[in-house]
Image (cartoon, rainbow, N blue to C red):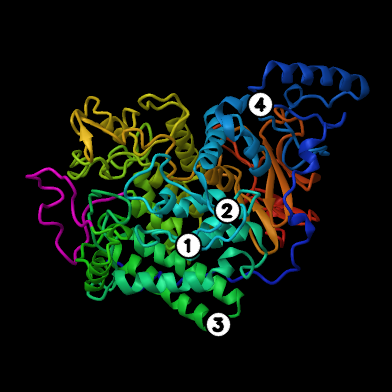
Amino acid sequence: MAHGHGRRVTFVPPPAEEDPLDERSALLIPSSVRRPPSANAPSSCTKAAACGCLGLALGWLWVSRLQSPPPPLAASTPPPSAASSPPPLLGAPPIISLLPFKSILNESMPWVQETVPLFECDDDDITKTYWYRWRLFNLHMVRRPAKAPGCGKKEGCWVITEFLQKVFWSGPYNTIVCPAGHHIMEGRWLRDAAIVDDYARFWFKGDGYRKQYTWWAAYALWQRSLLHHSHSSRGVQAELFGHLDAHYDEWVATHYSPKGRCMFTSCHADGEENSAGLDGCRPTINSVMFGEAIALRSIAAALGNTSRAAYYEREARKWQAVLTDQLWSDELGFFVNKAEAAPAALHQEWHKYGKIGRSREVQTYLGCLACHRPRKCPPERGWPLGKRVPVRELMGLSSPWYFSAVPSDDAITSARYARAFEQLEDPEGFDAKWGPRTTERRSPCYNFSNSAQCNWNGGSWPYETSKLGTALINLLQTYPRQPSASGASFDKLLRRYARAHTRSHAEQLAPPHVDEDLHPDDGYWITRRKLHGIEPWPKTGGLGARNGRDHLRARGTHYFHSTFNDLVLSGLVGVRTHAEFLELHPLTRVRSFCATRLWLRGVDVSVVWDADGLTYHHGRGLHVWIDGRPVGSALPHEQHDGHVLAPVVRVAYDGSWMADCSLQGAASKSPRC
């Protein structure tokens, strides 16, 4: 057990107050995306562009060659060195055509054209999945009527669903709070702020079942505000602070275990049914409470509420101590569940809701649901109370780093905990062809039960995979360097996750598609196959099954229970906002990418990475534009295992400066880094 050392919380202070955003914060499509390319700044269409687009491009290139010959291609001369070659002079940012993705976007094409950042890269699976996931988002947008509680807008108010098909355990408008944190994190990149604003108000001013599952409202809204506002006193999270504050206290009142001195939840309330660790003081909810506390601390400080800010700083320290002192296993080198009984206050809440006929608004399941007997793992009578469970589960890797709840005081402390990531690429741990397993392969608890529809004891769940992706991003971008994970780890995870969308098998559907849980070795969607009663799962349809087939067998069609595009933009592109500057820290091994129409703090940002300069013809390196105006370029810095790595840069929001802050770059000694 780890006692005492390495528990100091490193808090991000609220950014200094800046001038209010100007009129550029209104919704618009930048002229840099609409205007045709100039003769001295050729732009590229997507590699998979239609023939018409290609013909126009070739014709334009012929004319442009008559006007101004292009610079020689990088392949014709020795590659320039980072030390001797000046950055190229940039023209307009590239134009990304959506025509090649029309069959993926379908009915969502007009919405996408107006609302989302544009992106492409040289990995077709990632690019296709990116556009499919925006269609997925749009499909799950539902308008509540103006008269609905907490709305009052003539045009109605948006909510976002988990299932397209109505399921009986959902709340009003088929909403379920379990993936709401993911919905907000994915939606934080939208130009139309009303979508997520409406959704947030629904949970706290409307009639949503906001205590049905573990989720992270304040943290997700705070992370969103960091992209859009220079100060946490602006945005819907500030408007809802009183509600978020009370929501936090409600969870502590019902889920805190006085005996265990930690937050209790069941695996079912975590949305992780039949988890190998079952119920107790799980790394999930205790990490969530840390994330909620640091978010509420920042919002309270920005609003001038110093007493609540101080309270939440103490709360964050408390939850971090729970993780390091109670849930960290030195023997396993991992954060694990500690078995505890449900506190009396939680039983009282269940009784209260049941008495008034609202038991569906909270999770009342405990233990193992539809599990095999006899069995040894997990024990039929449950794990010994007060003891750490001797099983590594993916949630013990994803949750602590997702919320940056792991101490980052120094490199030694960081590396001590980060060794948990060694399990990510261990085939006896979580490593698998189609995505990370939810329970380590070597454990006797692996895949211990399959009778229930949903099991988190082996299958690969996008819900947890996307949390793991964000955890890796935080580890690699904000923690000291450590030997257990690298940018290659994130790159491998993202590529596999993309292929799970584009190459997996789903009954009655062609890819791209995302469902509930994927077989980590064989690449089919497990719950979907169960609900269809197909081998090797005959007669396992479960709830409402007739002849082995469930009437909700198509419920997982285009299932929205995770993020993907947030991982692309914050990880692959590497967007991270700070008070005074924008940081770009790409975690990728792709040779080229282009992201335009990134709406950040009232300006339009475009980013191009081109390892050899042959894709977009702006030269080798990372190139940045603000509001269509070129800001600067940074050359590749390091070659590792044959891969050219993108530099880390910082850019002023007004485009007045850009600094190369890569460890290998001479500019890394700049005071701006």
Judged from the image, the secondary structure of the residue bearing numbered disc 3 is helix
Task: Check disc 3 and give the amino acid type.
Answer: Thr
In the rendered image, which quarter contains the C terminus?
bottom right
Task: Check disc 2 and give the amino acid type.
Answer: Gly
Stretch in magenta: 365-393
Viewer-side label of 3, 1: 1
Q: Main secondary structure of the magenta part?
A: loop
Q: CA distance from mark 2 to mark 4?
A: 31 Å
Q: Residue at x 34, y 35 (%)?
A: 518
Q: Earlier in the sequence, mark 3 or mark 1?
A: 1
Mark 1, Cα crowd under 10 Å, few <14 / some 14-19 / many 20+, is some
Task: Check disc 4 and give the amino acid type.
Answer: Leu
Judged from the image, the secondary structure of the residue bearing numbered disc 1 is loop
Task: Check disc 1 and give the amino acid type.
Answer: Gly
Q: Earlier in the sequence, mark 1 or mark 4?
A: 4
Res 156 label: 2
Viewer-side label of 4, 3: 4
**Front residue of this view, candidates 299 and 71:** 299
Judged from the image, the secondary structure of the residue bearing numbered disc 2 is loop
Q: Earlier in the sequence, mark 1 or mark 2?
A: 2
Res 99 label: 4
Viewer-side label of 2, 4: 2
Q: Residue at x 67, y 47 (%)?
A: 598
Find out whether the residues at labels 1 and 2 contact each other: C-beta distance under 8 Å.
no
Q: Position of residue 628 (x, y in %)?
A: 79, 44
Q: Residue at x 73, y 21 (%)?
A: 53
Q: Return the residue at label 3.
A: 306
Q: Earlier in the sequence, mark 2 or mark 3?
A: 2
In the rendered image, which quarter contains the N terminus?
bottom left
